[in-house]
Image (cartoon, helix red, strand yellow):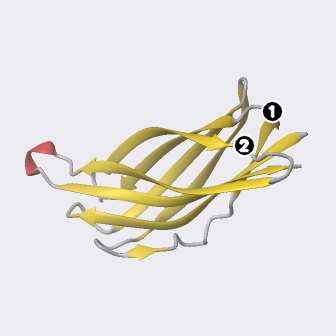
Amino acid sequence: MALKVTVSVLSETQEGDVGDDWKFELNVKIFNEGLKGDGTIKVKKHLLTAGTVQEPPGPPAPLVLPGGEAGPEHILVRLNLKATEVDLFQNDVGIIENDVNCHCPTEAERISALQTDISVVVRESPGFLNQVAVFSLKLRIVIERT
């Protein structure tokens, strides 16, 4: 029986003093005895003020990827987040990679879900200003037997 993995962005937030114009790309790779699925969620430039928790504009469609064959207890979901604070002359960018070990549903369960956060530090350029923001996404990962 095959697995289907759905990754949804539930909310975004940023804390800091580097600016209010943000965009992001979230690349997702699914590993189950090798790479089984790969895709990206992109959100264009939009307003995100410090301290605000909001649904990203769109909102972006969930990313649905193949998860390979059911069998192992866990599969690996690799998240690569690139957050950009858009500036007139030089954008400020932060990149982070995070692995999430996800429980595969049994035949009786048929579906498993979890929520996770991914955060990245973005530093203002030029670096001598020493201004920093932390950009965060709240995600839902659902694994289904199909």
**What residue lies at 38% left-to-right and 53% top-to-bottom?**
84
Query: On the image, numbered disc 2 is attached to which residue?
Result: 104
Amino acid found under the numbered disc labelled 1: Gly
Are the residues tagged 1 and 2 within 8 Å (C-beta)?
yes
What is the spatial separation of the Cα atoms under label 1 and label 2, in whole angstroms?
Answer: 8 Å
Q: Nearer the viewer, residue 49 or 105?
A: 105
Is 33 rendered above or below residue 133?
Answer: above
**What residue lies at 72% left-to-right and 43% top-to-bottom?**
104
Q: Which of 56 and 36 is in front in this view?
A: 36
Query: Which image quadrant for residue 57?
Result: bottom right
Residue 24 in the image, given as x and y percentages of width and height:
47, 55
Quadrant where the N terminus sits is: top right
**Secondary structure found at label 1:** loop
**What residue lies at 25% left-to-right and 57% top-to-bottom?**
133
Left or right, 136 with respect to 80, comes to left
Q: Nearer the viewer, residue 12 or 91?
A: 12
Residue 20: mark: none
- Disc 1: CA contacts within 10 A as few (<14), some (14-19) or many (>=20): some
Query: On the image, numbered disc 1 is attached to which residue?
Result: 71
Label 1 vs 2, first from the N-terminus: 1
Q: Which residue extends farthest left?
A: 128
Residue 58 in the image, given as x and y percentages of width and height:
60, 72
Is 133 rendered above or below residue 76?
Answer: below
State how many labels appear: 2
